[in-house]
Amino acid sequence: MKNAESREIWISTLLESTDGFCSRAALFAVNSKNLRFEGGKGIGAAIAIWKRISGASAPAFQNVVDSKETVVAIGTSGELSDAIAEFLGDTSSKRVFSFRFCCEDCGSVLYAEPAGEAEPVDVSALELLAALAANSWIRKRLWFFRPAELIQIARPPERGATSSHAARGSGT
């Protein structure tokens, strides 16, 4: 992720990095109570969701945002919201996982789910991945938006005037 040349590549790399840890994954940007779908792995058409989601309609997402801790929920519309549950398809029999991380200007939620009820999700690996993603994004932002290095150019001494450095070094 640290070598990603664009935001899209960074998101794609993050989602590809979930391979082996979960079956399906999605990244949502969180700004206040708004969620925006940023990309997914194993999820149908990459359509954008940008809806106002209240804590009452999406408790799984609201809990992860408020607590800053990993949240495990059942993938029902009551936990995910009607819009997200419809978008993700039938996950009502699965435990789904949400991992929060901050990316300087907004928070993000990495959503993960297993292939089936008995399939594992490697929670520790995904928590580590979320921490690495946040770190790499912050470094990327600093790298992309670093102010140009300035070079200080000193004025040459005026004619006939000795510099204070020369005067000190002369011993007079």
Image (cartoon, rainbow, N blue to C red):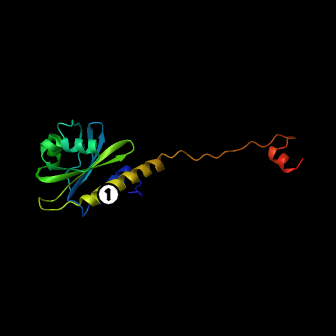
**Image quadrant where one finds the N terminus:** bottom left
| Residue with the mark numbered 1 | 129
> In front here: 118 or 39?
118
76 relative position to 148: left or right: left
Residue 95, x across and y down, in percent:
15, 53
Residue 26, x across and y down, in percent:
24, 51
Decide: is 57 above or below 73: above
Q: Note whether residue 29 is visible.
A: yes
Residue situated furthest right in the rendering: 172
Give the residue at x 27% y 59%: 124
Residue 29 picture quarter:
top left
Residue 98, x across and y down, in percent:
23, 50
Residue situated furthest left in the rendering: 93
> In front here: 50 or 165?
165
Type of amino acid under label 1 = Leu
Number of callouts in the render?
1
Residue 17 picture quarter:
bottom left
Give the residue at x 48% y 45%: 145
Near mark 1 (Cα within 10 A), the count class, few <14, some 14-19 or many ≥20, is some
Residue situated furthest bottom in the rendering: 20
Give the residue at x 34% y 54%: 131
142 relative position to 114: left or right: right
**Circle 1 sits in a helix, a strand or a loop, which is it?**
helix
Q: Note whether residue 12 is visible.
A: no
